[in-house]
Image: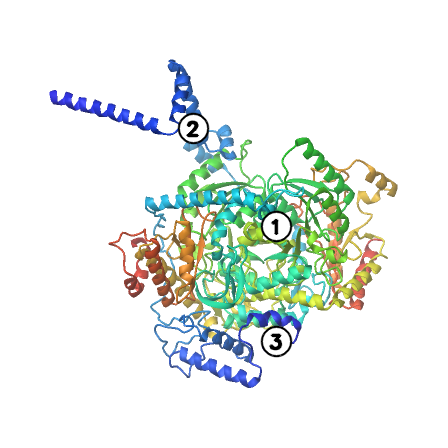
Amino acid sequence: MALNRGSSPTSSIFKKQKQSPSPPTAASYLSALSQADARARHAQRGTPTSTPALSLSSSLTSSTEDTVLAEEDADSSDGLAIPVGKPPNSEQSYTTVHTEFGHCYNEEYRHVSQHPVGAPVPRHVEQDPPYYILFSTYISYLILIVLGHMRDFFGKRFHPYSYRHLMPHDGYAPLNSDFDSFYTRRLKQRMDECFLQPVTGVAGRTIMLLDRYTPDYNHSQIILDTRTRALNISSYNYLGFAQARGGCADAVEEGMKRYGVTSCGSRLEGGSSDLHALAESVVAKFVGMEAAVISSMGFATNSTFIPALVSKGCLVISDELNHASIRFGVRNSGAQVRMFKHNDMKALESLLREVISQGQPKTHRPWKKILLIVEGMYSMEGTMVDLPSVLALKKKYKFYLFVDEAHSIGATGPHGRGVCDYFGIDPRKVDVLMGTFTKSFGASGGYIAGTRTLIDSLRVRGYSGAYAEAVAPPVLTQIIASIASIMSIDTSVGPAASVNKLGISTTPSSPPMQVTEYSHPGPISQRALPHWLTLPPPLSSGAEGLMRLRRLSFNSYYLHRGLDKLGFITYGHPSSPIVPLLIFNPAKMIMFHRMMKDRKTPIVVVVVAYPATPLVTSRVRFCVSASHTKEDIDSILRACDEIGDILDLKHGLGKGERWSVDEVCDRAVELVRIPDNEH
Amino acid sequence: MASASTTLDTVVLSIAHSLSAVERTFYKLPGSAIIERYVRSSHQNDPGRTFLELIIFFLVVRTLLQSRTRADRNNGKNFIEFSDKEIDELVEDWVPEPLAKPLDDVEAAELAAVPIIAGANGPHPTLVNTGKPTINLASLNFTGLANNEHVKQRALEAMRKYGVGSCGPTGFYGNFDVHLQCEKDIAEFLDTESAILYWQGFITASSVIPAFCKRGDIIVADRAVTLNIQKGMEISRSTIRWYDHNDLHSLEEVLQSVEKERRKRKGPLTRRFIITEGIFERDGTMTDLPKLIELKQKYKYRLILDESYSFGAVGRTGRGLTELYNVKASKVDILIGSCAIGLCASGGFCAGSRTVVEHQRINSPAYVFSASMPPLLAVSASEGINVLRDTPSLLTRLQDNVRAARAILDQVDSISIPSHRASPIIHIHLRNLSPSDMLHPSAAASMSNSKPSNPSSPVPRDAPVFDIEREERLLQEVVEEAMAQGVMITKAKRVRSLEITEARPSIRLAMSSALSKADTEKAVHVLAKILKRKFK
């Protein structure tokens, strides 16, 4: 397919993006190929006879693409392209590209994410910074606001043209008034270099940034021709399935050949294919529910299905930190909403007692139903819901429970099945399990799982089914392949003889997939998968899936506790791949961001501030991935340690209790293995 | 004793000292003289007056400190005190409704009859339901891009470069070069300043509208806008005025009445929007764009035009309504389209001026809070545009097929087709079944002359009455019969309980240039025959 390049005038976008021109002749292709192989062998540290590290894919094309990838990295001295650390033994060989999914051979660097059954769930305590930090933070915002208003005042008088779009003109009210946009213009725009960074390539362990600069104080950004490869601790790639090479990508290619790129329409109006039904049954088995429905966008999963669950006369109780999509859906539903303090079970119980006893406002009629919406893992805090306590309350107060597992599915639990798995709870005790495929499975879209009755009702009454486009086939294949590799495939029954003819029918007898027994959480039968789907042995046996889960858990614990030991204030549960590091002062955010990016090994980070967080607690949010090696986390810790000293960010542990960064790196395994309640 | 008195003395002394120090610093403060004067004049040697002042002061403080959310206030008024035991009993007694009502027989039967395609979708897919190949008049594949090998190749190459997922929102490293390229391609294709991609076609309008329309703004909308626009308007909390479906005369009346209202109230200038669709999802009618633009300019409204069903479907190269009517796309302030429908990729877009687009990058919830579209789908959207631009014959073929289908359907007496002659989606209503159809034409004419509808209500004055249940059932029978004969069609599916006004049940045909004219005619003939036989 690469040979097709240039066959049409439309190929220009690809040419522009690839800096290295493609070799003109077949001979140079081959020489490039052999060079790449040589590099790969070098990367594998003297295992010349083993499988080339780059790819198992046999086609000439993909190898050529590899070559291009490797050439781009060859001249970089950032140390991102070549694995360091313990060399592999004879049984280990990686089939992934190191820049997408790091090679980490040391079996010590694994950990199982699991809550000890019966143990109390430790309450998350938020550490406060010293007063001078709080004070200087408020002062900083005050200065920014005063300066901003002064600039507006004089700007409107001396440069009225640049304020034209904010003022009424020509009989039109401004699209966005100067007051409404003040925060955006005067505070956010100052640090625009932290946002909307254009990138290219795979958002895996590393990411390729398109360099840019601004000639006019962030009014416009000019994208340059140069690129920078950076260590990516920002993308939602928990299990490292963001890959353009490897078993899943090969499966997606096969799926695209069979099913095309698009589904053409909504699920109920001619956009359903057998692949949709298969993917839904796989997801249902994975999360341990009777049935599941999938939707083409994570945000839309909440916003279009919640109105089908609750309506006027119902009450939604929502955690105060719930995601915007949940609020969007609830507002569309017409139900009443009450919020409770984040993860505070006492506040929740007293709220429940109040709302059930008072009934609907004014009329005091009993609520039709009460739906509690919580998230498994909170995206800005990294905290985990106290599911055992919520279920205890559920038993007593009879509300329905909706758990949004956008960030926890795949990322937590010994089998990757989310918070239920982490706490060792039967998922069927929860009424509605929602999740997305963006974060852990390298795909996109979302699902809702529950009883068959519930899901069938959502198919018909949720408006995703009738109006919104169905999920695209390549995304479906990625979902099926990545989930199957975590579940591991049970081949004992043999592949299905013919194409599975599945309907999304409701009659319990018709779908043949019910024939295959499934015990949760167990392997998935080959019959329940598309007959053409073949995954390479490390994926189909579940070994790689398990390795991914354990590496993710190790990395999460290591970064979390490492930062703690270095003296930083972090939030969240140590097993959560989201690790927020508190920065407080607004000016330090952009400094931190730039200092991380300008290092010899550039690291890209996400900084978040008001309004996504409370005003004072601006933070850096690291998103750990299974694709990171222990050495990657080391380098992040070292970077944080250096920058933390310069920017005065260490306000956590007292000086005496802190560890040096070398000690943290050396005693990583020990640090990770401390039980949760003793840390 | 003596020592005690000396300590007391020192205490008194120090108090007096500090008091005088406080007094001195108080007088040093700027503005202290004013406060002093105020206290003196209010006190006037009457402690009662000072007491009253103090009470007022505390009341003000209390009011300021009070929480002012509405829920709290309501609770304060309606709150009933219960003892713990009573609450326990109430909790015990409360029986919630089931979370989901099971499907009734009709719904279940319809769900079971939903066509499911084995393998790739296209003009002649094989159905799982029947196991036979069919002619596809249901899936949205107007220009046949879904089966374009070139687009597929490009998407495959993109997959090998970018993987599948984008793994993050655009704000945080999910802003891929191919997304930027696709936005640029759309903007160039439509000739607007800028464009922004959304990751689902359906959510686009629901998110664009609340990004611009806020509480207090005025929206004038068509009574038959599709569900996502309704939901977007609901979220926006703006004041909504409605005009009769696709009736620009009614629109002008509403615009005048809004203007009158504003003059009477003398309020500040607020944002005003007209929201409508290019080709309506509900019935395939088409907006008269030049007239609409004229009106919006005359009354100084901004136009939000949803071209989801017209982009990639009408116009010489599929640029949509603006190309069909030869209107500059930049005259439409906010133009919404769908890459999923028009370009057979995924997602939607909003095109407009740079200000309009950049505003959404921070203020549009579905853009900000969602991971971006898989890069390979952005590539296939870009390629789709290139194909459309280079091969206008696709659109000509589509129009030929539309004309052929309409010619056959015109001969069926028992149906009425509200859709525009050029619309590639054709809605079929059943005639002579509902009370509104029974009216004599003259009666209908007199009805249209009657007083205009109330603009604050989405329901028109003379709402047509039809028997939804019966029509749905009959249409479903037609659909299933056609499927059995190898023609895949579908009813226009909707969630009736969530729609703000009732849409008349219809069969929705989607034409495609991937089908030959002969195949289109053959399929429509099958449908026409069924319709003729069933409804004489």
Residue A504, percent from left and from top: 62, 59
Residue under pointer 1: B208
Check disc 1 and report its element: helix, strand or loop: helix
- Image mark 1: chain: B
The disc placed on residue A5 is 3
The disc placed on residue B61 is 2
Residue B490, percent from left and from top: 72, 57
The type of residue carrying mark 1 is: Val
Q: Residues within 10 Å of mark 3 (few under 14, many from 20)?
A: some
Mark 1–mark 2 CB contact (< 8 Å): no
Q: Residues under labels 1 and 3: Cα distance? A: 37 Å
Mark 3–mark 2 CB contact (< 8 Å): no
Q: Residues under labels 1 and 2: Cα distance? A: 41 Å
The type of residue carrying mark 3 is: Arg
Query: Taking A606 as reference, is A161 above or below it?
Result: above
Q: Residues within 10 Å of mark 2 (few under 14, many from 20)?
A: few
The type of residue carrying mark 2 is: Val
